[in-house]
Image: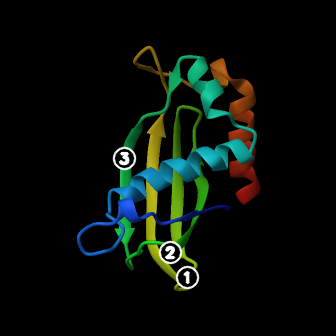
Amino acid sequence: MFSYIRKAQYHETDQMGIIHHSNYVKWMEESRIEFLKSNGIDYKAIEKEGIASPVVEINIKYVRPVEFDDAVEIRVDIFKYSGAVIEFEYEFYNRMKDEICAKATSKHCFIQNGRPTSLKKFLPESDIAMRKLIENKG
């Protein structure tokens, strides 16, 4: 599982002084892109091939609040990959308070010109890298 650490910013808080729930989705994207990059998968290169990876499903379970200036470790991993669909899991860990603050999943498909596609066909090196990530989990 890959770890991405960030500080909760003041502008991300709501009127109650905690991080607004919508920011978790942004943090998921930040950590997902860094996770892929750390494993040799360049999301920008995927997009240059005309392939997009829209979110088709997202689930977040909020457990504890995060406050301004807390250090949050976002642990991310792939838990399913078919070539055309990829699913990630996330765990948000508040390092300042030593507690899990949220758990989440996201599901994405790959499309090119508005149609479903497989990475194996257009970016076989990225497909191989993602399959290795799944294999290494077992």
Label 1, label 3: how many angstroms apart (C-alpha)?
Answer: 30 Å
First along the sequence among labels 1 and 2: 2
Where residue 89 appears, as percent x and y from the top left, is 52, 58
Where residue 104 appears, as percent x and y from the top left, is 44, 62
First along the sequence among labels 1 and 3: 3
Q: Quadrant of residue 60?
A: bottom left
The kind of residue tagged 2 is Asp
Query: Which residue in the protein does label 3 denote?
Result: 57
Crowding at mark 2 (Cα within 10 Å: few <14, some 14-19, many 20+): some
Q: Which mark is residue 70?
A: 2
The kind of residue tagged 1 is Met
* Mark 1: secondary structure: loop
Query: Which residue in the protein does label 1 denote?
Result: 96
* Mark 2: secondary structure: loop
Name the residue rendered at 60%, 17% in the picture: 49
- Circles 2 and 3 in contact, beta carbons < 8 Å: no
Quadrant in which the C terminus is drawn: bottom right
